[in-house]
Amino acid sequence: MKAVVVHAPRDLRIDEVECPAVGPGEVMVRIRAGGICGSDLHYYLHGGFGTVRVQEPMILGHEMAGEVREIGAGVTNLRVGERVVVNPSRACGQCHFCQEGKANHCLDMRFYGSAMRMPHVQGGFREFLVCPAVQAVPVPADLPLEQAVFAEPLSVCLHAARQAGALHGRRVLITGSGPIGALCVLVARHAGAREIVVTDLADAPLAAAKRVGADLALNVATDPEALVPFAADKGCFDVAFEASGAGSALAGALQAVRPGGTIVQVGIASGEATIPLNVLVAKEITLRGTFRFHEEFAWAVFLLATRAVDVMALLTEVVPLADAVRAFDLAADRSRSMKVQLAL
Amino acid sequence: MKAVVVHAPRDLRIDEVECPAVGPGEVMVRIRAGGICGSDLHYYLHGGFGTVRVQEPMILGHEMAGEVREIGAGVTNLRVGERVVVNPSRACGQCHFCQEGKANHCLDMRFYGSAMRMPHVQGGFREFLVCPAVQAVPVPADLPLEQAVFAEPLSVCLHAARQAGALHGRRVLITGSGPIGALCVLVARHAGAREIVVTDLADAPLAAAKRVGADLALNVATDPEALVPFAADKGCFDVAFEASGAGSALAGALQAVRPGGTIVQVGIASGEATIPLNVLVAKEITLRGTFRFHEEFAWAVFLLATRAVDVMALLTEVVPLADAVRAFDLAADRSRSMKVQLAL
Amino acid sequence: MKAVVVHAPRDLRIDEVECPAVGPGEVMVRIRAGGICGSDLHYYLHGGFGTVRVQEPMILGHEMAGEVREIGAGVTNLRVGERVVVNPSRACGQCHFCQEGKANHCLDMRFYGSAMRMPHVQGGFREFLVCPAVQAVPVPADLPLEQAVFAEPLSVCLHAARQAGALHGRRVLITGSGPIGALCVLVARHAGAREIVVTDLADAPLAAAKRVGADLALNVATDPEALVPFAADKGCFDVAFEASGAGSALAGALQAVRPGGTIVQVGIASGEATIPLNVLVAKEITLRGTFRFHEEFAWAVFLLATRAVDVMALLTEVVPLADAVRAFDLAADRSRSMKVQLAL
Amino acid sequence: MKAVVVHAPRDLRIDEVECPAVGPGEVMVRIRAGGICGSDLHYYLHGGFGTVRVQEPMILGHEMAGEVREIGAGVTNLRVGERVVVNPSRACGQCHFCQEGKANHCLDMRFYGSAMRMPHVQGGFREFLVCPAVQAVPVPADLPLEQAVFAEPLSVCLHAARQAGALHGRRVLITGSGPIGALCVLVARHAGAREIVVTDLADAPLAAAKRVGADLALNVATDPEALVPFAADKGCFDVAFEASGAGSALAGALQAVRPGGTIVQVGIASGEATIPLNVLVAKEITLRGTFRFHEEFAWAVFLLATRAVDVMALLTEVVPLADAVRAFDLAADRSRSMKVQLAL
């Protein structure tokens, strides 16, 4: 079968790989749709991020949906032909973090398409994926797979929202309007935020943010002072989601968030950032990281299945597998794309 | 009367200033003891910190205790001769932060010995201070004033502890063992912390930290790897207090704190810090600022008055007013001093 | 001018009362719409509730909207003719609860149409009301006053929602589907609740609950076992709002809420209730009261003004002032009414 | 071997039972000390509590310590002769509550000496107990077993304290001063509570409460109005622990706790209680249950082993196994005893 394999920075190939057998408790999924995510792009463009580097050829992809093709012994909750979206996260269930309910911090995590451990966990941009049945979450037959495959990034943003405490009635700032920032807009709206202001350096992603519910979209490249009015009287936002990973965006958020407010750091970027720690101290701001998700995956599927949220405004293009390199280049160009998907 | 006035960096003088009259609702306090704090040292050594600069001669001091000398009209809760410690913080009570219970973020705060507003709020290192009666908090006649005057920095640390959530049973790291770091040790012990580990770059402050209750004191200058074992399995501390203001200390804390843990940033240092934001994200750490105090002042006085905590191990020397410059130089030398006080 | 005055249980009269003058900082509002609330009904039917009893004739009403007729000296934020909804809550701003941000617990609260203090605070079911300008909150000219007047009960439910923590993605039970219970449905939906189940003893209020967003409406009079499936495996609801004030409803909620879940007690009923404390203990359930509102009033006005919520499905009838007794009798009949309003 | 077996209410026998074999991963402990707890007394006096009834002969006891006599295959963390205290709680580790970090709500819990499931889980008042090695927690050789055996009730109170949020600096009320109430005093003191007031109906337990740190002990039988001054201005306690299980005590706590305060319900008593729900509502009080413990057991052992707390003031008598019935009768007499232990 075919798979999308990164070999080195800028060296992405469609390789022929072997199709694994289905064991007990497992299912084989015919992957149909794959969403390209920021970390896929980091592997493709830079060979990794921070200390995480691609050290052997790795199939990319952790956003994927398809239909069940084969069922292993003992699997009772799925049937052949059923549509599923795959939860890429497999925690061990035994370590002390798993037992505390913090499975996203599992000491033995296997996450599809991640170079965090060696050998790498191969990803899901492939024609057939064999996974534990519990990771294949059924979706209604009438839910298009290009919507279902948003379950993963939506989970990330639902988890980020939980890190912020209640958003209901809050004034929310979102810095960085890529796919994750824009999904944070959509999630904050769904959670009843009172006001949502988004910033970015480019107009195209800001327009997308407005399409999914932002009240105000500010280009801080063309108007670097755009957030200044919001910083009056020590700041007015209750919550910020910093989705750009840029130190300058975080600095801006620290100015515009009110004393006692919370900034959820979603973007990871290159690693280090220089921040005005004195502002964080003087305003007693909470800066909290958010990392992946756990029980939010089922919730994301539920929201998509019931059409409680509409993600389609964020889908730029579905690109055939054969044009995978073009798909990645398109995904890497923020001026032209939000979410790019592969048809596998 | 005499007062300790900073005119410019390294230009500290004992000036003769006028003694104000006592108005209604006010008291005059004969100041006897004044504790030198880190911000006093910043004014003395550098003329300020961050954007806060001394722009006119300013009497220093916001840690002071003495006895009531005169009572204004309408004051009923104090009597002449009573010992008091002065709360240096005067919030307006009217702005929206005051009405929300966040008086330490008051939009019209007057804090003794602070150059944050212009004209500056003159401080308390003077022979006589006239203040609203509500800011003069009585202490028992048998409480030595050199203990009472610890109420202010102790309040800072009690407030910092509140920013961390419950410390009871927690494993606590404290980076930086100056007077504030050491008082954080004492407070964490009082709050029932399970284990307290302290780091610093010098042995003298580490020894002081052990005297007030640290279980383990690590010199990270002589052993830069001292915290590494605590960072195993993603880190073990539930809570850290970063009391040094150094980016490198914060980076160390981010490594040693467990996923979901909290770092309270107490130190302000020069302003900016470069931090490994990816660690904060991947471990979902909460980094929260703490700024001064509010209702904790009365609690600090209570703890000192009832001898629930013992701060005397942190007092280096009481220096006569005439030797104020020597006192400041001593306070600035971490190898020789923890808390230095003036006898006024 | 005319006013709706309760003299004794079942003795409600339209009395002629004097129109007060407008002082500095005050406005006179020509009241046009008044919503009848549960506590109005308690005064009308029983002369009070618990220890709160009508001891002198009292104008009822604390849900009212109208237009500004006259403006006192110094009022700059309102103009004659502007539509306003009146916030019935006037906290002192000075007591320690006000200064802590808990103004709804003010020790010197004046709340329109309440017999909690003596002399009673006269209410707002009258043609002209003079109130501090800050209590008259402007609404857009195109917002019908019968919608604006929902701001008060909506505030109660927004405040109740805050007592529950984040509702986003939560499974929510609401017991009792009167006007408050039904508004809790609407608020929970707006806050992104995942599932909302409502119970009541009558079909009419259950139908109203479905109109404002309930997923499931259960009549526990006709099917007393209706909640049993939800109590399996120690219960499944994360949050419950108990809006009936009935001990049996609270007992049902205790069974159906999951371990560690929260029940917000909104209904006050007669005072005492007998509850299975052992279930609360064994499941570590949080039972928390909610009382009135504070900053939620402005938020409620914002939600109504922006049509973020639609309350009209809950309005039963607008009754002319002359028929006030009929209006109260209608409001007291749960089989025929949800919210009844007076046209004043 | 001998064991203390309840057959029916008031029918407690010392029976000869078979000694089980040690399997892989298990250890055999020679039990030396057993503490009699309130639930043991309920089984002895009433045959159970609430819906939990003794339906077959059951060995009582879930507070026990001894030394390791034999070690099963694969056990590496214990050695023969080592002193241990036994954690009576065995959660399944697999159900969704266990995986959420709420093991005390495990759907398949096995807790020594509990009739909650059928067949009952036999208890630990016996000469030899075979248990999974992970449940036998080592204690230092110099820690007397009569102190070690307090680990279980101390865990209960440490867990209760966690349900209350931070106790540091809080004013705390404890209603009911039996062994659990008195241990709550000790725990609140250890957690840095500012003031601790205890109530009971008898003088002897109040005296014990003072020995372990209560500031004030009030007999509400002889002075039913004793709490009234604390209820002024809507109440002054931040936190209460209701450890009597009596509705009247809970009603008193509701009066004396301040708006927004928390009452942790520790006592279970007979099941139902009649409470003034209107007070809970009007003061927005949080009433939260607490049930057993989980990770607190290791912490309790640590506190006892390091002598951070001193429980000996609560030990009434150590009674030989042969006099078990007398031990139970003594434990049931609040005027003569706090904690009674069996020497096995």
Image (spheres, coloured by chain):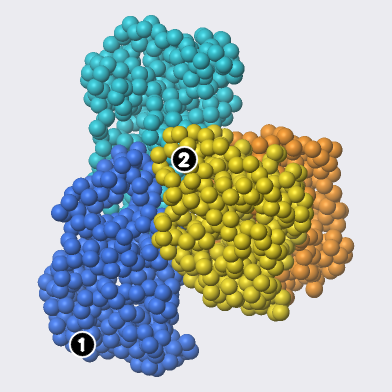
Chain colours: A blue, B cyan, C yellow, D orange
**Which mark is nearer the camera, 1 or 2?**
2
Q: Which amino acid does label 2 sit on?
A: Ile
Q: In this view, does A262 lie to the left or right of D110?
A: left
| Count of marks placed on residues | 2
In the rendered image, residue B145, in percent from the top left (x then y), is placed at 50, 16
Q: Residue D231 carries which label?
A: none
Give the residue pinned by disc 1. Answer: A2
Query: Mark 1 is on which residue type?
Result: Lys
Going by the image, does D268 lie left or right of A236? right
Which sits in the foreground, C79 or A79? C79
The image quarter in which residue C319 lies:
bottom right
Along the line of sight, which residue is nearer the eye, D284 or C319?
A: C319
Label 1 sits on a secondary structure element that is strand
Residues beneath discs 1 and 2 located on the same chain? no
Residue name at image x 27 percent, y 65 percent: A209
Residue B278 shows up from this direction: no
Res A118 quadrant in image = bottom left
Classify the position of the C terminus of chain C by image quarter: bottom right
Q: Name the residue under label 2.
A: C71
- Residue B336 locus on image (x, y percent): 33, 22
* Quadrant assignment, res A64: bottom left
Between the residue at mark 1 and the residue at mark 2, the CA separation in whole angstroms equals: 77 Å
